[in-house]
Amino acid sequence: MEDTVRYYATGHRKNAMAKVWLTPGEGKVLINNRPMSEYFGRKTLEVLVQQPFEAVNAVGKYDVIAKAEGGGISGQAGAMRHGIAKALLEVNTEMRPVLRKLGFLTRDPRVKERKKYGRKRARRGFQFSKR
């Protein structure tokens, strides 16, 4: 068994969930066994995932291994950011004020509203015609 230290946290956003493991390393990010650039394919999402490291001056100090599921890739990127921020707290709790101020520790609770009976979707009614 390996003797390196691993920090674990789960991140959530909308219906997406990310299980995140941080290990001391050189900044490699693997999501579902694929490199981040290959998995997301959008530079903006890669920047989003790196934000917690930039906030605490830890860019390139930790390798990230993550398992993302549910939602879309944008939600998964947000879940990754949340999970990385929570894992950084496992590393050092003194990072909390910085991460809290930037909103990285807040779970995004927005989820799709359920469909109601008598309606086409959650709020949209059926088309009405007087005649």
Image (cartoon, rainbow, N blue to C red):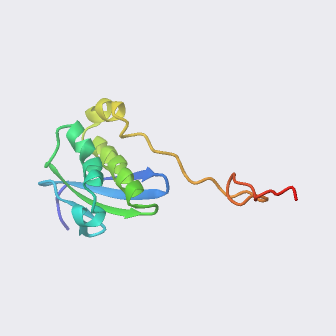
The one of 126 and 31 positioned closer to us in this rendering: 126
Horizontal placement of 3 versus 42: left or right? left
Q: Is residue 6 visible?
A: no
Q: Quadrant of the rendered structure where residue 76 is?
A: bottom left
Quadrant location of the N terminus in the rendered image: bottom left
The one of 40 and 22 positioned closer to us in this rendering: 40
At x 34% / y 30%, what residue is drawn? 101
At x 23% / y 37%, what residue is drawn? 55
Q: Position of residue 115 (x, y in %)?
A: 68, 58
From this viewpoint, which residue is outermost toward the front? 131
Q: Position of residue 111 (x, y in %)?
A: 55, 52
Quadrant location of the C terminus in the rendered image: bottom right
From this viewpoint, which residue is outermost toward the left? 26
At x 17% / y 42%, what residue is drawn? 58
Horizontal placement of 109 versus 131: left or right? left
Q: Quadrant of the rendered structure where residue 98 is?
A: top left
**Compared with residue 97, is residue 91 higher up or lower down, i.e. above or below?**
below
**Compared with residue 79, is residue 36 higher up or lower down, i.e. above or below?**
below
Q: Is residue 115 visible?
A: yes
**Compared with residue 67, is residue 47 higher up or lower down, i.e. above or below?**
above
Horizontal placement of 7 versus 74: left or right? left
Tell me how many marks there are: 0
From this viewpoint, which residue is outermost toward the right? 131
